[in-house]
Every structure is written in structure tokens, then in C-alpha cells.
Image: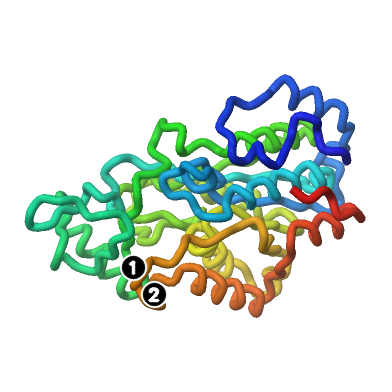
Amino acid sequence: MTRPSYFAASDATEIYLERTTEVAAAADQARWRPSADDVIRRVLLVIDPQLCFAHPRGSLFVPGADADTARIAGFIYDAGSALTTLAFTADRHGAWHVFSPHFWRDSSGRPAPPFSVIEDFSVYRPIRDEAAVARYLEELRKNRKILTIWPYHATLGGPSGAIVPALAEAGLFHALARKNEVLFLGKGEDALTEHYSAFSPEVPALAHSSQTEVSRFLEAILSHDEVFVAGQAKSHCVRATLDDLMERLPAEALGKIVLLDDGTSPVPAIPGGGPLLDFPARAEEAYVAFAAAGMRRETIATATQRLTGTRGIAP
């Protein structure tokens, strides 16, 4: 289809209120079939497409995420008539989480700087819950994982946790044009464990949030014949979500997972951190492994052409 006149790829770097009147009018003009009529059911799962990650002024901006978001929004307009469902996840964090700078203090009372790696209490100690935090670090070690201190991001109630407006508009457009609600899942409110994956925290025993909503969301995603995956960041939340899918799906079902290579970017490597903190390299290694296990890799242009017979419009 012709993209709506209100949309421009540059919108992905803007912060504004959704243009709901224009979006609704464009959706009416699209005259797409309802999703309920789809014989082959496809879902686009976008992990954490939030301002804190995808906007250049975001506190945890992932370089390349703004361009990824523009391409994802374009994909929805170009190929949305072949996408049954859209699904978004979003981080939601309070101030006192185990990965927050002020949760930790050194012997002089100074907080841990962002991007510090904490393996024990030798330099920094938690301000509370020492026994639980010690258990958390031990569980991470057992699973060859690390605790990274992150800048404050996706704070509850704050604008940094909002979906990028241009993508929120695309979601509303799709919902109206195809008469199917966008699926949404919030994650990350448990204070004593990180929650990279959309489907499970790093250490489930330290989480208190209900898994009922997660189970319903996952069931809805997996009810589709094809699952396109994009979002932020390739090295963390996207990768962890895909790891979860690897564990939950039988090998023969992995072929329905499609990794949109140009719809995600990694957190940059931490200088001097060695291979463990070379996040781009680790992300690519994971994607190679996912493909070897049966998941498919495509660019957004290739996926658009496959679904519609056209290449779409480059953002």
C-alpha cells in the first residue's frame, strides 16, 4: 500500500503525541481485510521499542535503534495486510532495582557507575537485601551471566518508558485497519532480578510478579504460524527472549521464528571489558546459533517482498 501521508521515517527520532485523528482516517482508507480472515497467521513481536532505548536522547540509547524503529514502522505500513497481529513488550522499572546505580555503594558511599559489572561485594555492596542479592549473584554465576549496572531507564510513569510515537501510531493504524488489537506486555518490575526476556526473569525464584499475563501473551504469540522478531536490544532483551523461545519450543517449531536482522541493534561493547562485555560480538554469535537451530534470518525488505510481492519503500 501507499504509506500514510502523515508518516515519515524521520518521525522515529521525534517525541510527540500520537496523531490519532490522522491515523484513524488513514486506517479507514486502507480497506484491509480483518485479521480474523487470515489463513496464514503471522505476528510481529517487537521487544521494548521504547524511547529510552530507541531515541538518540534516551538514557540507554542503542546506536542504530532509531533507524531500526523507522524500518519496523515502515514494515507495518508496507506489509501489515499480511501481518495478523502486532505485539509489543516494554520494560518497566522503579528506582531501587538490583541493576540501578544507587542500589549499590562503595566504602565511601558512592553509587556504582552505569555499565559497572558486579560479581561480588568486594567493591560495592547493596543497600538492602544482601542475602537475596548474594543468592542472585550466585545464580548468575552458575548460568555464566553477569550483573550489569544500567543508567536509569524506563522508569515507571515516566516518558522514557513510552513506545516510540511513530511506532505507536503504526500499531494503532494496524489495529484499526485489521480490526485486531495490539498485544502488549510489560516486564521488569521485580526489584531483585533483571528481566531481559519477555517471558521470564533472570532468576525466577526472586520474582514476585504473576506469570499469568506472561503465559497468555506467550500462548497468543505462539498460536501464529510465523513469528517475526525485532526490537531492542539485540544483545540483551531480544537475545534473552529468543533464548527463552529456544527452550520452550520443540526443534521442529523453531522454523516459524523469523529474525529481522535490520530491526534490532546491540548495546555497544564496554571498553576494556574483554569478550564477556563485547555485546555486539556476543549478539551475533547468538544469532548464528539461533539460525543453526532452525530460526530464519531476513531483512525487512526481503520479508516485505516475500509477504507482498513488493520491496516496500526504504525508510
Residue 143 visible in the picture = no
Q: Is residue 164 left or right of residue 302?
A: left
Residue 13, how many percent across, how many down? 59, 40
Q: Which mark is residue 158?
A: none
Q: Residue at point 65% right, 49% down?
A: 220
Element type where label 1 sits in the image: loop
Say which residue label 1 marks. 146
Q: Quadrant of the N terminus?
A: top right
Element type where label 2 sits in the image: helix
Residue 191, how many percent across, how many down? 30, 48
Q: Residues within 10 Å of mark 2 (few under 14, many from 20)?
A: few
Q: Residue at point 46% right, 32% down?
A: 159
Residue 123, quarter of the rendered image: bottom left
Q: Is residue 278 left or right of residue 217?
A: left
* Residue closest to the eye, 26 or 223: 26
Say which residue label 2 marks. 276
Marks 2 and 1 sit apart, C-alpha to C-alpha, by 9 Å
Residue 65, how many percent across, how many down? 57, 52
Q: Is residue 25 above or below residue 256?
A: above
CB within 8 Å, label 2 to label 1: yes
- The amino acid type found where label 2 is placed reads Leu
Q: Residue at point 70% right, 57% down?
A: 227
Q: Residue at point 41% right, 45% down?
A: 59
